Every structure is written in C-alpha cells, then in structure tokens.
Amino acid sequence: MSLEDPVVITCSISGAIANREQCPAIPYTPAEYAAEARRIVDEGGTMIHIHARRADGTPSYEIEDFQAITDAIRAEVGDAAIINFSTGTIGVPLQKRIDYLRACRPEVAALNMGSMNYAKYSRSRKGFVFSMVFSNPFEEIVQLLEAMNELDIKPEHECFDVGHVGSLAPLIDMGVLEPPLHVDCVMGVVGGIPPTARNLAAMVENIPAAAPGERSSHWGVIGVSRDQWMLVAAALSLGGSIRVGLEDNLYLPDGRMATSNGELIAKAREMAEDVGRRAATVEEARSLLDVPQRAVTAA
C-alpha cells in the first residue's frame, strides 16, 4: 500500500462492552443502528463492523438480532456500506458463531488470530479494571476459516500482536487461507502489542509478502481508547487504512465525547485528507479488500 491508495474507513458501530451510561450515542435497536449507519456513510465510512445487541443493550449472538440489524442498515443505506460481523467473544460456542454467519451471510467477518491476556488497567487504581484470557486456538481459527471459505465471506484478520501476524503464514501454507489478505492491527489492549507507530510498522512488515503474480494484502489499524488518533495518523502516513467508532473509542482528539459514530468518521476522513489521501468509495473498498462487488441500489 502507498499514500496514493484511497483509505478504507471502517466504523466499529457499537461493540459489546460499552453502554449508554458511558456514551449515550451507542446504538441498541435495529433502528438506531440504521440511523448511525446513515451518519457513517454520509461522512465517508464504507465498512460497518457489527456486534449485535438486544433492545435493552445487552450483547446478542442470536441469528435474529444480527439479521434485524443487517436488514435495518441495508434498508437505510442500501449497498453503500460493506457489512462486517464480529466473531470474537468469550464463552460463546464456536458453532453458534458459525450459525449466524451462515444464516446472515455478511460480506466480511472478523477473525481473531490468536489467544492472549485481554485486560484494561487503571493507573489511578493501580489495578486491572478487568482481566481475562481471550482464547482463540488454531483449531477454532481453522474451523471459522473453513466456514468463511464455504460461505464466500472475506475474513478480516484481527491481530493483537506480532505473533498473531506470524500465524497467517502457516494457514496460507495449509491452503485454508488464500491471499490477498485483509489484516487489521489491533493496538491499545493491555496484553497485546503496545500502541506505538514503530510497533505498527513492525506488524505491517511481518504480513506475509505476496507471491509473484499475487495482489498485495491490504492492512489497516484498529486503535483502542486514547491512543486511537495517534495510530490513525501513523497508519495514514504508512499507507494503511483505518477504523474508528464507538466500540473502540468514545472521544474526539480534543477530548470531547462523540455524539455519534458519524462524528468520529468525519474526523478520520478529515485526517486522511490532511495528509493528502482520500476516503475510498464503497466500490474501491470492495476492490481493495477483495470483496465481490454488489449491485449498487438507491439508498
């Protein structure tokens, strides 16, 4: 990737952890997801990463909730956004996650590339706000990949450390993963790689190189919490794509809480333009990510 490439701007629309007590703008209902999707698309976002919720805001892994949210977004923005489902969670059976992929057929699905300690640390409390083991063994990674291959869903490889990036090569060699890849470097989670521009460059350097005649893989950054905007700037300078949204970070660079996902997307687009890049159209995003083009309909 280079500075001449357009920027795929992804929005993590809600996540599964934060709630309205922390940020009133987080969507819960399908109608609220759809309203946020409109704001995202209008500001230049081209992919929406979905964690499903019930109407009371609690996380859901049920087919009907993923389908209702997807249908509402499609009804609002048509094919102007790529739909991306989360598959990462703790304590939810693998088959249940495959079932909602099979039933709803998103264009892209996130695939966590390794197990790790996953925590949030409070310097003021001198202790962990939460701490857990996020298990993603190779056996489950392969089963998810096989399901995505069968369903023609593009995997988005979420890598929380350099070792996760290193896990891509054996899967390519096994034949269960076919380049070009779509790799996102997740930074800012305690237990994963520290969030610095140099570490981002190191992760990108370790993405498997394209074989002769193959397209190069696409990559982006997912910055979590207060380091997000610094990492967005680093990715833009290195030629990568970016993700922002209320799952990852609730605040604008000046410290104000975002009033919508659209406000975060607008700032990300502005930063891209400030360094001489531009937001990709949804058609360009599908091409860059190697996602089949959809017939564009009126939104």
Image: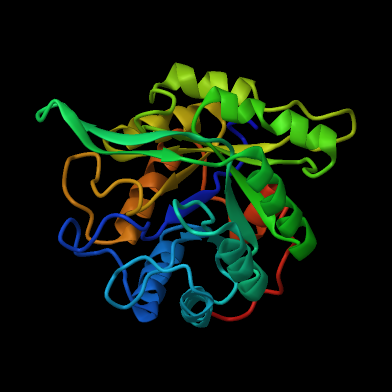
- The quadrant in which residue 4 appears is top right
Q: Residue at x 34, y 47 (%)?
A: 267
Closest to the observer: 265 or 48? 48
Q: Residue at x 61, y 29 (%)?
A: 165
- Which scheme is used to colour this image of the protein? rainbow
Closest to the observer: 202 or 68? 68
**How far across and how far down the image is residue 222, in percent?**
45, 40
Q: Residue at x 42, y 55 (%)?
A: 12
**How far across and how far down the image is residue 65, in percent?**
46, 77
Up the image or down, 270 lies above or below 119; here it is below
Residue at the left extreme, as displayed: 124
Q: Is residue 233 left or right of residue 110?
A: left
- The quadrant in which residue 40 appears is bottom left
Up the image or down, 285 lies above or below 236; here it is below
Residue at the right extreme, as displayed: 213
**How far across and how far down the image is residue 21, in percent?**
15, 61
**How far across and how far down the image is residue 33, in percent?**
38, 72
Up the image or down, 159 lies above or below 33; here it is above
Q: Residue at x 75, y 26 (%)?
A: 209
Report the number of numbered marks. 0
